[in-house]
Image (tube, rainbow, N blue to C red):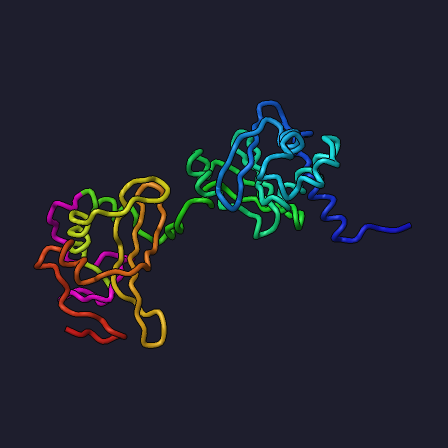
Amino acid sequence: MSFPTRRTFLQTAVAAAASLFLPGGVRAGGTSGFLHAPTGESWAVEDPVAWSLENTGQPVLERARERLVTLTAADPQRVIRLVVRRCRLNLLEFRPGRVVVHFWGTQGQADVRPFFKKHSLAKKGVEVFLIDRKRETTTVQTGADFLYGERLGEEFPLDVYLEKWRRRAVEEPDDWTPAPCSGSNYCWEGVEQRRIPWRVLKSAWRHENAPLCQNCDQPTLLSSFGYFTCGFYKRGPQLIRICRLCGSRFEDHSPWDGPGWMLGNLDEPLLPSADLMFGHPVK
């Protein structure tokens, strides 16, 4: 009598769990679709197995055609594994509050963020099951894990930034104090080094045509800007922006004309007094 190996046991267990999401075990009202990893193109299907078997002539299924014509709907697991492996398709199945994504290995996994954004799935209330059919492993995440950018840490005082942003046109007694969690290589007289005073951020918020959040399509708030050390005696540009709606943080390292940007977006009295170069302020 032979016993199954750990690998065989895990594959069997995960395959059994995956079968709950395949067409044979779909509950009424569920919908499915395919997402093409290389192009991001997606389309809905009523039955992914039947669609794969009936559309073998489609260019997107060309690499699986020879094998598909030998299969039937009696073996949905093989059909799905074949199309996600050879055609770089991701099968997406939808239930209330749940999305299941079948893909083949890291190279075959599509970037689902544009799809999740378009269909309002990138939120905490959505469970996401990622099933890697190559390794037969399942990872459970939430829709919020597929937002663009990074999530702000709990230590970031978002409420304080929101209140300052709402009063960006109003001068307040504490506007010359450093904004917490801000950062810059530029220095202002009387302000802690590597920090930006609220008055400077307020000026930037008033004048800058800020880029939109990739999740909410609303203007972002600048929290840091400057040239930061990124190697041995090397500095690179970095602008950090936050979204007041989804709490995301975006870093921009693209080429940036610091002096030109400040002249265009900061009131003249708020221009910095020095540039902090490798720990030493240079006027």
Quick one: 100 or 39, which is closer to the camera? 39
Q: Judge from the rendering whether residue 263 lies leftward or rightward of residue 124; answer left or right.
A: left
- Give the main secondary structure of the magenta stretch: loop
Name the spot of residue 273 as percent of width and height, x first.
13, 67
- Identify which residue is drawn at 42% across, 38% down: 117
Percent x, y of residue 217: 32, 40
Q: Residue 137 in the image: state x and y as whole percent.
A: 64, 48
Q: Quadrant of residue 227?
A: bottom left
- Residue 74 location, quadrant: top right
> Where residue 132 sits in the image (x, y, percent)?
62, 47
Residue at the spot 38% in from the left edge and 52% down from the top edge: 153
**Residue 232 counted in the magenta span:** no
Quarter of the image with the C terminus in it: bottom left
Q: Quadrant of residue 226?
A: bottom left
Q: Classify 229 as above or below 65.
A: below
Residue 79 or residue 233, whichever sits in front = 79
Asked if the stretch drawn in magenta spans residue 192, the answer is: yes
Residue 21 in sight here: no
Q: Which residues are the magenta region? A: 167-194
User: Residue, x 29% and y 63% (percent of image)?
Assistant: 237
